[in-house]
Image (tube, rainbow, N blue to C red):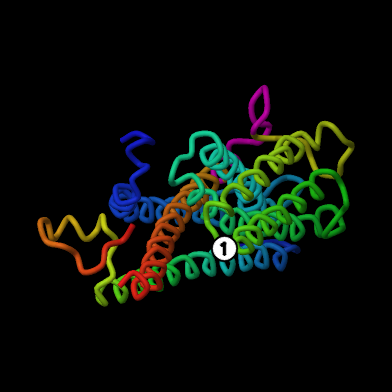
């Protein structure tokens, strides 16, 4: 493949695109892992939202009810 | 499933979980097809030479830079007019993705401009209005971070977004309204595209691939924001629990 006399500009454009898109995907994926980990930790400590607590424990009072 | 039904975040998260693998796979396949066409099939342009390959990135990024703000504007209406519970989640999630695509539009445009125009940058109407769009993205992201209460931040960001939406027609028609270095529209125009099919086909595949990528990332970022708000609620409950007891 011959990219001609301006190959440097073409490679730079695709290189920057790969870096920025990869960083964006990585940031969103890392944020998802961080949020799910924090949520699990809080729920494991007995703090649950009311809507989440009622469904699995119908008829029993949740330890702490969320608004 | 209607927009009203999607107002339930739990139902929305379930839908995202079902869609995500399909959207990711479709994006990857389209991107592979687009890159194959770009580097193995598409001919060099008779004037630009191989530099036309930068256009297969730059044009989709330019469209998606505006698409991002359009999504935020519709979401802003959802926040202010319809008070849809996920509208501000959508607006907040779209901002960094739109900013990233606008940044890429500016950088790839500069890297194309240097060999073709002889300059990385020119203060003409199209380039300047896109730079303003990028600064507006940074502004709205700063606004989200500056106001702690999400509902107050959402209203302030919605007003900012709707005022900023006036920049979208300015970007689109800047090449018609002013005498600019940037070429006029050659794809989305009355009378059809002026580009030969051998160049247009890879351009459209790449545009579809990046559009799907934008949608996928937007849904993923919305999911993150919903989880973040649940955590915030739980932290508030945790802080209030000893006093309540």
Viewed as shown, does residue A5 lie left or right of B118?
Answer: left
Where on the picture, by quarter, is residue B5?
top left
Q: Residue at x 53, y 41 (%)?
A: B79
Q: Residue B199: within the magenta? A: yes
Q: Circle 1 is placed at which residue position?
A: B148
Give neighbour class at mark 1: few <14, some 14-19, many 20+ (Cα, 10 Å): few
Where on the picture, by quarter, is residue B171?
top right
Q: Residue at x 56, y 39 (%)?
A: B80
Q: Residue at x 77, y 51 (%)?
A: B132
Residue B195's x, y, as percent?
Answer: 66, 36
Residue B214's x, y, as percent?
Answer: 50, 51
Q: Image quadrant for the C terminus of chain B?
A: bottom left
Task: Pick whichever, B223 or B29, lies toward us.
Answer: B223
Residue B172's x, y, as percent?
Answer: 72, 37
Label 1: chain letter? B
Magenta span? B188-202
């Amino acid at each position: 493949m011959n990219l001609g006399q301006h190959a440097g500009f073409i490679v730079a454009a695709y290189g920057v695109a790969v870096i920025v898109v990869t960083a964006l995907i990585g940031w969103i994926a890392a944020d998802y892992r961080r949020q799910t980990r924090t949520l699990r930790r809080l729920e494991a400590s007995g703090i649950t939202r009311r809507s989440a607590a009622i469904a699995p424990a119908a008829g029993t009072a949740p330890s702490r009810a969320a608004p | 499933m209607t927009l009203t039904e999607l107002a339930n975040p739990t139902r929305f998260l379930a839908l995202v979980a079902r869609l995500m693998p399909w959207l990711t796979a479709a994006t990857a396949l389209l991107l592979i097809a687009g890159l194959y066409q770009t580097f193995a099939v598409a001919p060099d342009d008779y004037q630009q030479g191989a530099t036309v390959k930068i256009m297969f990135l730059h044009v989709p990024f330019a469209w998606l830079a505006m698409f991002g703000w359009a999504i935020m504007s519709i979401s802003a209406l959802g926040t202010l007019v319809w008070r849809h519970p996920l509208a501000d989640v959508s607006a907040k999630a779209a901002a960094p993705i739109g900013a990233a695509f606008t940044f890429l539009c500016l950088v790839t445009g500069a890297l194309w401009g240097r060999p073709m125009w002889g300059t990385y940058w020119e203060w003409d109407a199209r380039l300047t209005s896109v730079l303003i769009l990028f600064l507006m993205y940074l502004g709205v992201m700063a606004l989200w971070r500056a106001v702690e209460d999400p509902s107050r931040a959402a209203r302030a960001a919605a007003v900012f977004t709707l005022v900023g939406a006036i920049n979208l027609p300015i970007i689109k028609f800047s090449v018609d309204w002013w005498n600019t270095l940037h070429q006029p529209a050659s794809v989305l125009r009355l009378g059809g595209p002026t580009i030969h099919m051998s160049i247009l086909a890879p351009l459209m595949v790449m545009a579809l691939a990046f559009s799907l990528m934008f949608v996928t990332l937007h849904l993923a970022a919305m999911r993150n924001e919903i989880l973040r708000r649940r955590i915030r609620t739980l932290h508030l409950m945790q802080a209030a629990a000893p006093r309540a007891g």
